[in-house]
Amino acid sequence: MELRTKVINLNTAGFPEIIDLSKQIDSVLKEFKFIEGLLTVFVPGSTAGITTIEYEPGLLKDIPALCEKLAPQSAVYAHNETWHDGNGFSHVLAALFKPSLSIPFADGKPILGTWQQVVLADFDNRPRQRQVVIQLMGNTEN
């Protein structure tokens, strides 16, 4: 059983940006030659989340529309009153979406549905430099 960690740096535009992480995840599995195990994808910070969606144009519009209904940018947030940074809605959305996701993998590939991709959702109200941590635990090629 082996454990490896890789940090990927991304520049984001802020809300509503959703970035497909599939290529990065596949690349890390190949780089470390993992065959089966469990991978975790984590984004440090309190204004972004990791989830799975079908990464297609309709959902790339539907998800931000839903987010605006759940936590409208124009609503009054105590966070904004405290820090005056205008991103209270970003913190609320990140708390709902969560910062990490664990996915089993076999034969060197994540076990996902046919139309399921792992994504980073950036909810902040400004561009950010994000880190995405991919941690692998499992068996490698001999």
Image (cartoon, rainbow, N blue to C red):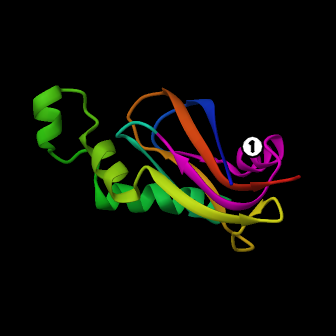
Residue that extends furthest to the bottom in the rendered view of this protein: 113
Instruction: Magenta stretch: give its range.
Output: 17-43
Q: Indicate the amino acid at tag 1.
A: Val
Observer-nearest of 135 and 79: 135
Give percent across and percent down for residue 118: 62, 57
Q: Is residue 51 left or right of residue 81?
A: right
Q: Is 21 a magenta residue?
A: yes
Observer-nearest of 71 and 104: 104
Give percent across and percent down for residue 108: 81, 59
Give percent across and percent down for residue 42: 51, 46
Observer-nearest of 97 and 80: 97
Total number of numbered labels? 1
Residue that extends furthest to the right in the rendered view of this protein: 142
Q: Residue at x 47, y 35 (%)?
A: 14
Q: Residue at x 37, y 40 (%)?
A: 47
Residue that carries the numbered disc 1 in the rendered image: 28
Q: Is 100 a magenta residue?
A: no
The reply to whether residue 57 is visible in this rendering is yes
Q: Is residue 72 left or right of residue 117?
A: left
In the rendered image, which quarter contains the N terminus?
bottom right
Seen in the picture, residue 86 relative to 2 is either above or below; the reply is: above
Q: Residue at x 28, y 52 (%)?
A: 72
Seen in the picture, residue 66 relative to 130 is either above or below; the reply is: below
Q: Is residue 13 left or right of residue 48?
A: right
Q: Residues within 10 Å of mark 1 (few under 14, many from 20)?
A: many
